[in-house]
Amino acid sequence: MQALLEARLPARISAVISNEPGAKGLEVARGFGVPTRVVHHRDFADRAAFDRALMDAVGEYDPHLSFWRASCASSRLLFWHASKAR
């Protein structure tokens, strides 16, 4: 997250959304003035409810491209998702 923000790419980062309230990326984003939001997975009865809430949160920022990061075993995975065709 910090590297993306420091790179000053010709793009606007609309928001950083995490399912973990203590995620370092939230703190970094706030330091750069990027809006943040937490959608905590433990607040939902099941995965489907969490996924709907997460998609609603992402949609509030009307992104053109969504960036997803997840931990998987000992490596980090990066996911890019085209939110809208423009």
Image (tube, grey):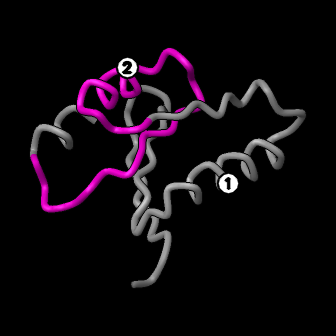
> Which of the numbered marks, if any, corresponds to residue 56?
1
The residue tagged with tag 1: helix, strand or loop? helix
Instruction: Kindly give the residue lying farthest to the top in the view shown.
Output: 22
Q: Is residue 52 left or right of residue 32?
A: right
> Which of the numbered marks, if any, corresponds to residue 24?
2
14 above or below 85?
A: above
Residue under the image location 53 percent in, 34 percent down: 37
The residue segment tinted magenta is 8-35
Circle 2 residues within 10 Å: few <14, some 14–19, many ≥20: few
Circle 1 residues within 10 Å: few <14, some 14–19, many ≥20: few
Image quadrant assignment for residue 6 = top left
- Residue type, mark 2 in image: Lys
On the image, the x and y values in percent for residue 20 come to 57, 23
- Residue type, mark 1 in image: Asp
The residue tagged with tag 2: helix, strand or loop? helix
Residue under the image location 10 percent in, 45 percent down: 7
Image quadrant assignment for residue 59 = bottom right
On the image, the x and y values in percent for residue 84 come to 48, 76
On the image, the x and y values in percent for residue 83 come to 49, 69
Q: Is residue 25 magenta?
A: yes
> Which of the numbered marks, if any, corresponds to residue 41?
none
Magenta segment's dominant SS is loop
Q: Is residue 74 left or right of residue 52?
A: left
44 above or below 68?
A: above
Q: Nearer the viewer, residue 46 or 25?
A: 25
Image quadrant assignment for residue 15 = top left
